Amino acid sequence: MIYEGDRQMEEFQPIAAEYDYLSAKAKIVIEEESGKITRGTLNLRAKKDSALWFTMTPGMGMEAIRGFFTKERIQIRDRVGNENINLSYAEFEQFYGIKLTLELFQNVLWANVPFAFDYQDRLLRVGRKFELTQVRDNVRYFSKVETSHGKLSELVSTSLDDRGSVLASFPKFQDAASQPFPAAVLFKLAYQLPGGSQNTIIYLEWTSIDPNSEPLSFPFRF
């Protein structure tokens, strides 16, 4: 069901996703700079502010990638390319040029404003959107927030040293437990590798989102 907002946000009061545990499924398409395109199914589980776990399965049914994000580390097991990641967030930023935390990642995933609004931020209302600029830890975040549902329609984050950037676009939303959640999202990532900068496009179409899940397990090991 497509989410239909029944209000117009007159003052800036963005909405954040409410859940303790969440499970979701999506169709995923990954397009790499080399032209390689991977299609598959994404299964995701989350415990808010604590853990985020996912598996990706291509069309043949065999798990290709499994990932586990905690407050301390990013761990990704690549069963196909064997390009595994087991890094702290500081190490991840140093290697790839993209600053992440678990809280920031889950906010961007569910179209929440990246950080709570405070006096140092720049906020403008432009028609039916609020435009919010936030600078945190040498990264600039520019958000467009819809007045109809209080969620992001677009986010651009760019490191001030130009090492990495993320663009996220949320074209439509769905109703999940009477909350607005993205129905689709397009990510464009620019990041660093030893051989130079790389660009990757990721498209997600969420087929189910359950923000009322019972406690979940997060099986992961290298």
Image: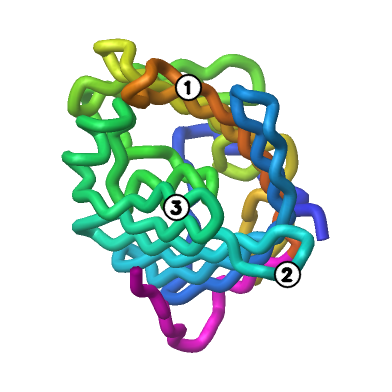
Q: Position of residue 72 (x, y in %)?
A: 19, 57
Asked if one can make out residue 170 in the rendered structure from this viewpoint, the answer is yes
Which residue is disc 3 drawn over?
A: 82
Give amino acid for label 2: Gly
Left or right, residue 120 beside residue 157: left
For label 2, the SS is: loop
The disc placed on residue 61 is: 2
Asked if one can make out residue 146 in the rendered structure from this viewpoint, the answer is no
Which class describes the residues within 10 Å of circle 3: few (<14), some (14-19), or many (20+)?
Answer: few
Mark 3 against mark 1, which lies toward the viewer? 3
Q: Which residue is drawn at 75% across and 53% down?
A: 3
**Quadrant position of residue 178:** bottom right
| Quadrant of the drawing holding the N terminus | bottom right
Left or right, residue 202 beside residue 1: left
Magenta stretch, residue numbers? 208-222
Q: Earlier in the sequence, mark 1 or mark 2?
A: 2
Q: Earlier in the sequence, mark 3 or mark 2?
A: 2
Q: Which residue is drawn at 41% across and 78% down?
A: 218
210 and 131: which one is in front?
Answer: 210
Mark 3 against mark 2, which lies toward the viewer? 3
For label 1, the SS is: strand
* Prevalent SS, magenta region: loop
For label 3, the SS is: loop
Which class describes the residues within 10 Å of circle 2: few (<14), some (14-19), or many (20+)?
Answer: few
Give amino acid for label 3: Asn
Magenta-colored stretch includes residue 221: yes
Question: CA–CA distance between discs 3 and 1?
Answer: 18 Å
**Quadrant position of residue 27:** bottom right
Q: Where is residue 97 in the image (x, y as percent from the top left)?
A: 30, 26
Give amino acid for label 1: Gln
Which residue is disc 1 drawn over?
A: 198
